[in-house]
C-alpha cells in the first residue's frame, strides 16, 4: 500500500501543476491571447492532465474498494507516471514554440488517456454492482 500511495503522489505531483483539476475537460480555458494553434495544443495537454488525475483517483478508489488489486493499481499508476512524463514532453515542445511537433503528441495522449479513463471507470462501475 505504501508503494501505491507513493506512486499516486508522484503521478499527482507530475500531473497537477498547471492543471484545472476541478473542471471537466470541456470547460478548461486556455490563454486566448495565444495563436489558435497554440490554444488547441494547450487544451489537449490540459485535458490529458485532467484525465491523468481522474484516472489516478479512480484507481485509488478501485483499490480501496477491492475492485482492483493493489498490483493492478500500482501497474496502472506506473503507466500513468509514464503518460504524465509524455504530457510534460508535449508541454516542453509547445513551450519551445514547436507547435507542429507538440500537437500530435498532445492529442494522441489525450485520446489514449480518455480511453483509459473510460476503461477504469467501467471497471469501477462493474465492481459497484
Image (cartoon, rainbow, N blue to C red):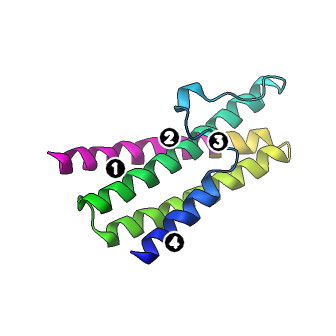
Magenta segment: does it hold 115? yes
Q: Report the Cα–Cα distance between label 3 and label 2.
A: 11 Å
Name the secondary structure under disc 1: helix
Query: Which residue: 33% across, 67% down?
Result: 72
Q: Mark 4 or mark 3: which is in front?
A: 4
Name the secondary structure under disc 3: helix
In the visual, does 66 lie left or right of 115?
Answer: left
The answer to whether residue 21 of the structure is visible from this angle is yes
Magenta segment: does it hold 7? no
Quarter placement of the C terminus:
top left
Q: Report the Cα–Cα distance between label 4 and label 3.
A: 24 Å
Q: Mark 1 or mark 4: which is in front?
A: 4
Relative to 6, say whether 44 is above or below: above
* Residue on which the image places disc 1: 120
List x then y, in percent, for residue 92.
77, 52
Q: Mark 1 or mark 2: which is in front?
A: 1
- Crowding around mark 3 (Cα neighbors within 10 Å: few <14, some 14 to 19, many 20+) is many
Relative to 38, say whether 82 is above or below: below
Amino acid at each position: 500500500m505504501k508503494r501505491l500511495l507513493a506512486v499516486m503522489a508522484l503521478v499527482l505531483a507530475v500531473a497537477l501543476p498547471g492543471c484545472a483539476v476541478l473542471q471537466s475537460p470541456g470547460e478548461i480555458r486556455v490563454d486566448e491571447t495565444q495563436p489558435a494553434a497554440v490554444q488547441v495544443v494547450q487544451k489537449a495537454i490540459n485535458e490529458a492532465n485532467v484525465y491523468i488525475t481522474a484516472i489516478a483517483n479512480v484507481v485509488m478508489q478501485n483499490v480501496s474498494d477491492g475492485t482492483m488489486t493493489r498490483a493492478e493499481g500500482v501497474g496502472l499508476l506506473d503507466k500513468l507516471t509514464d503518460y504524465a512524463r509524455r504530457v510534460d514532453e508535449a508541454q516542453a515542445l509547445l513551450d519551445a514554440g514547436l507547435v507542429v511537433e507538440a500537437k500530435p503528441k498532445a492529442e494522441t495522449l489525450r485520446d489514449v488517456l480518455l480511453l483509459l479513463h473510460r476503461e477504469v471507470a467501467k471497471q469501477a462501475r462493474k465492481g459497484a454492482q
